[in-house]
Image (cartoon, grey):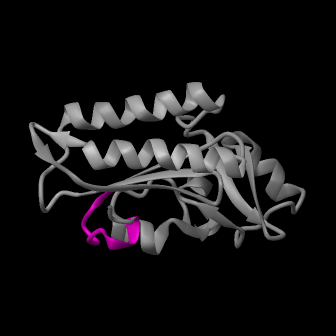
Amino acid sequence: MITLQQLSPESRIWVYQSSREFTADEVQKINTLATEFVTTWSAHGAALKAAAEILHNRFLVIGVDEQQAAASGCSIDKSVALVKKIETDFNTDLLDRMQIAYRKDGEIKTCKLPQISALLEKAEITENTIIFNNLVTTKKDWDNDWEIALKDSWILQGVN
């Protein structure tokens, strides 16, 4: 069993953000499901070197080191099936890319993308507010650019 931190910088990463915070019990159950999945995950019969974890009680992060074996379309479909199972079993939405998570007063809050302008106008958030960039695709990008200032993200491009 490996962790996300043990994956190489070139590893592929998928970040799924929950529409709500998970309870401690749910985190334990989801981590068990995800661990069972990645330990048996394969592509065309080749075992994948992969890891999955729930972070901040809200994000499911799945990573695969493709130096050993590359994730194929079918194997990626299997990971999406896991995500959909978690959505159903735990009554949450993990595939809504219009939902933005940000840090405010030590907490992680969420809003819909169209709400960003109003939050900026009310000074509820600023251009320096830390947001979670769930569009990262490699471990290196996840390590360096997952939590970034709003001004450094793609989000303001659509708002201004």
Residue 144 coordinates in the image, percent (x, y):
45, 75
Residue positioned 74% across, 45% down in the render: 111
24 shown above or below 74? below
Residue bounds of the magenta highlight? 4-12
Q: Is residue 63 left or right of residue 131?
A: left
Residue positioned 62% across, 42% down in the render: 18
67 shown above or below 143? above
Tell whether position 153 is magenta. no
159 shown above or below 141? above
Residue 103 coordinates in the image, percent (x, y):
73, 65
Residue extending furthest toward the right = 122
Q: Quadrant of residue 90?
A: top right
Q: Quadrant of residue 138?
A: bottom left
Q: Is residue 160 visible?
A: no
Q: Quadrant of the N terminus?
A: bottom left
Q: Is residue 125 left or right of residue 147?
A: right
Tell whether position 8 is magenta. yes
